Image (tube, rainbow, N blue to C red):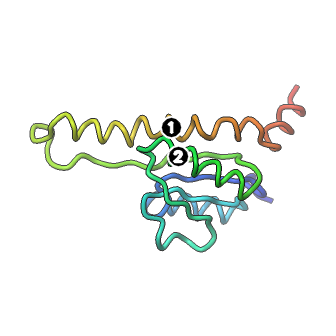
Amino acid sequence: MSEFNGLVALVTGGANGIGAATSALLHQRGARVAILDRDPEGTLPHALAVRCDVAESSAVDEAVAAVAGHFGALDVVINNAGIGATGSVSDNADDEWRRVLDVNVIGVARVTRAALPHLRRSPRRRSRTRSSP
């Protein structure tokens, strides 16, 4: 039995690269997986794919609620979505750095904020809390 059996895991930026590899591994280890991505087309077949841009608060709130509603719980969040700036440091205006900050830092806060109420209600969390000394 795996430590992820029966858990519901959400992976942002999970449609390709490290996020896709992470969601595949979570699935192999028994988790039910949801992927949030701006372009979830071609997402691995084992996952619930949800279109979501982590730079948009309302989209994040709706996507996280949809995942929790679909599976009935949320136990794990992997904040993997991220972007890089285009061009060099000296070439980029403040707007480009704000875009990177919005996705890579504030996006993590948005997803975590939306997920926390569901994570706190996780049956797995409650069972661990009760069995702890």
Q: Earlier in the sequence, mark 1 or mark 2?
A: 2
Q: Secondary structure at mark 1?
A: helix
Relative placement, left or right, of 95 versus 100 is left
**Residue lying at the far left of the rendered structure:** 91
Disc 2 on helix, strand or loop? helix
Q: Where is the C terminus found, in terms of image quarters?
A: top right
Residue at which label 1 appears: 110
Provide residue 89's location: percent of width, then percent of height.
15, 38
Please report the residue visible at 77 percent of the width from the left and 42 percent of the height from the top: 122
Graded by Cα atoms within 10 Å as few (under 14), some (14 to 19) or many (20 or more), the crowding at tag 2 reads: many
Residue type at numbered disc 1: Arg
Residue 129 figure quarter = top right
- Residue 25 image position (x, y, % from top left): 60, 62
Q: CA distance from mark 1 to mark 2?
A: 7 Å
Which residue occupies 57% across, 60% down?
A: 23
Amino acid type at circle 2 is Val
Please identify the quarter of the rendering in which residue 2 is found: bottom right
Asked whether 31 or 51 is in front, the reply is 51
Q: Nearer the viewer, residue 59 or 44?
A: 59
Q: Badges 1 and 2: C-beta atoms under 8 Å apart?
A: yes
Please identify the residue farthest to the top as the structure is shown.
133
Using the image, determine if residue 27 lies above or below residue 74: below
Residue at (73%, 35%) from the top-left corner? 120
What residue is at 77 percent from the left and 57 percent from the top? 5
Residue 1's tag is none
Q: Is residue 102 above or below residue 64?
A: above
Which x, y percent locates residue 82?
Answer: 39, 48
Q: Left or right of 119: which side holds 48? A: left
| Dot label at residue 60 | 2
Crowd tier of the residue under label 1, counting other residues whose Cα lies within 10 Å: few below 14, some 14–19, many 20 or above? many
The reply, left or right, for residue 43 in relation to residue 115 is: left
